[in-house]
Image (spheres, rainbow, N blue to C red):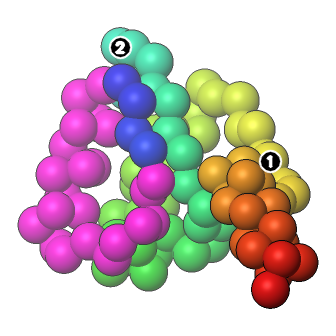
């Protein structure tokens, strides 16, 4: 299961509960790859409930490898170069 951009939008209570159910059913049965630009401490805000976020993180972090990638955005790299070229021409 691949879940991309956790935290892109704040979830309503019902949506957050559905995420918990999916993670719980998948827990110790299959792999999950998850991406987010939010720190774990911000997940309570994303899911609207600190306890629910903790329960989700408990299951996700039990058997995992966390890979933290810091640095400039790969998606913006070429766009920023184009903007710089446009600025240089003007």
Q: Are marks 1 and 2 in contact (CB under 8 Å)?
A: no
The image quadrant where one finds the N terminus is top left
Q: Is residue 72 above or below residue 47?
A: above
Q: What stretch is highlighted in magenta?
A: 5-26
Q: Which residue lies furthest to the left in this view?
A: 14
Residue at coordinates 62% horizontally, 72% vertically from top-left? 41
Q: In which quarter of the image is residue 72?
A: bottom right
Asked if the stretch drawn in magenta spans residue 9, the answer is: yes
Q: Which of 45 and 2 is in front in this view?
A: 2
Q: Which residue is tagged 1? A: 69
Label 1: how many Cα within 10 Å (few below 14, some 14–19, many 20+) = few
For image coordinates 57% across by 75% down, the residue present is: 42
Cα distance in 3D space between marks 1 and 2: 27 Å
Q: Position of residue 88 (x, y in %)?
A: 88, 78
Earlier in the chain: of badge 1 and badge 2, it is 2
Q: Mark 2 points at which residue?
A: 29
Find residue 82 and report its horizontal and vertical position in percent: 73, 63
- What SS does tag 1 mark? loop
Q: Main secondary structure of the magenta part?
A: helix
* The disc label shown at residue 11, or none: none
Q: Which of 51 and 88 is in front in this view?
A: 88
């Amino acid at each position: 299961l691949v879940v991309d951009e956790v935290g892109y939008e704040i979830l309503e209570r019902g949506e957050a509960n559905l995420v918990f159910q999916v993670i719980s059913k998948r827990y110790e049965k299959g792999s999950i790859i998850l991406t987010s630009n939010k720190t774990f401490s911000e997940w309570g805000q994303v899911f609207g409930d600190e306890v629910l976020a903790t329960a989700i993180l408990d299951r996700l972090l039990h058997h995992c490898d966390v890979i933290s990638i810091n640095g400039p955005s790969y998606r913006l790299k070429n766009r920023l170069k184009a903007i710089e070229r446009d600025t240089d021409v003007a």
